[in-house]
Image (cartoon, rainbow, N blue to C red):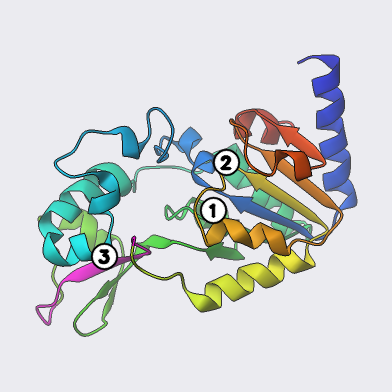
């Protein structure tokens, strides 16, 4: 690490130490170091060859019309019950226990923040760990998906659907409002592992009015010039030093 890089990292360490209302806004890059592929990178889900484009498979209409093919893709490429939290997840949980972190806002659906110990997590796109019958509304945990073959069915005969937000579906208003409020209360907002290209989730950062905005992402984003500190690094390289 060069001297300028060390100085920038020390500046982030100082910000974290001085802050008592940190909010973390994360995307797929938070979980890639846990072995979960992202969507838009060179090796991401959207670059994979499939019978239909992944964007189409992960839509509400595709789920209704081709549930079996949806679940085949979902189990193979989206559902990762074997994944474990990484250093970023654990560091955020540590900050929360110390009373420094207000909330984690995540676009991920893998539940790794909770597995690491975080309590205040706003999952903008839902979670693979929650599933519900589309006929009677009965809830199921992720084990029903892992243990079933083909399309999992409820005891009433209805199809069980993961409570993840698919294309063509709106985000949960309550979750959005809670996330918006957390961002509005933050003195330090760390945006990490996201290209900020998925709306309306990405638009939430426009409600930040605190003093310190930090970006940690492998590639450039549209907010680089708005940030006090910008790191184009892997998250683990930064969070392992905080």
Task: Find the magenta span and give its range.
Answer: 155-167
Q: Earlier in the sequence, mark 2 or mark 1?
A: 1
How crowded pointer 3 is (Cα within 10 Å; few <14, some 14-19, many 20+) is rated as some
Asked if residue 156 lies in the magenta stretch, the reply is yes
Q: Is residue 242 rendered to the left or right of residue 53?
A: right
Q: Quadrant of the C terminus?
A: top right
| Point 82% across, 46% down: residue | 16
Of helix, strand and loop, which mostly describes the magenta segment?
loop
| Residue ID at (64%, 28%) | 233
Label 1 residue SS: helix
Q: SS at mark 2?
A: loop
Q: State how far apart marks 2 and 1 are (Cα).
A: 14 Å
What distance separates the C-alpha of mark 3 from that of mark 1?
Answer: 26 Å
Which tag, 2 or 3, sits closer to the chain's start? 3
**195 and 74: which is toward the camera:** 195
**Vertically, is 8 above or below 75?**
above
> Which-is-in-front pick, marks 3 and 1?
3
- Where, by quadrant of the figure, is residue 236 drawn? top right
Q: Which of pointers 2 and 3 indicates the residue nearer the eye?
A: 3
Residue extending furthest toward the top? 2
User: Which residue is labeled 1 in the image?
Assistant: 113
| Residue 215 or residue 158, whichever sits in front | 215
Q: Residue beneath label 2, please?
A: 193
- Screen quadrant of the N terminus: top right
218 and 130: which one is in front? 218
Q: What element carries label 3?
A: helix
- Image location of residue 130, percent across then percent down: 35, 67
- Residue indicated by mark 3: 60
């Amino acid at each position: 690490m060069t001297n300028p890089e060390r100085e920038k990292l020390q500046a982030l360490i100082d910000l974290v130490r001085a802050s008592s209302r940190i909010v973390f806004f994360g995307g797929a890059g938070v979980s890639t170091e846990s072995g979960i592929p992202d969507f838009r990178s060179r090796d991401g889900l959207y670059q994979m060859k499939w019978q239909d484009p992944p964007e189409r498979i992960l839509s509400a209409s595709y789920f209704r019309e081709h549930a079996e093919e949806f679940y085949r893709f979902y189990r193979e490429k989206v559902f990762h019950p074997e994944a474990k939290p990484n250093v970023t997840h654990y560091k955020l949980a540590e900050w929360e226990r110390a009373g420094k972190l207000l909330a984690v806002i995540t676009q991920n659906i893998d539940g790794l923040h909770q597995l690491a110990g975080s309590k205040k997590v706003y999952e903008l796109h839902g979670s693979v760990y929650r599933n519900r019958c589309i006929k009677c509304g009965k809830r199921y945990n992720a084990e029903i998906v892992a243990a079933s073959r083909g399309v999992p069915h409820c005891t009433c005969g209805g199809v069980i659907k993961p409570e993840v937000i698919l294309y063509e579906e709106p985000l949960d208003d309550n979750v959005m409002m809670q996330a918006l409020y957390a961002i509005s209360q933050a003195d330090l907002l760390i945006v990490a592992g996201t290209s900020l290209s998925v709306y309306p989730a990405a638009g939430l950062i426009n409600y930040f009015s605190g003093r310190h905005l930090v970006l940690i992402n492998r590639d450039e984003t549209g907010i680089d010039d708005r940030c006090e500190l910008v790191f184009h690094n892997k998250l683990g390289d930064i969070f392992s030093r905080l």
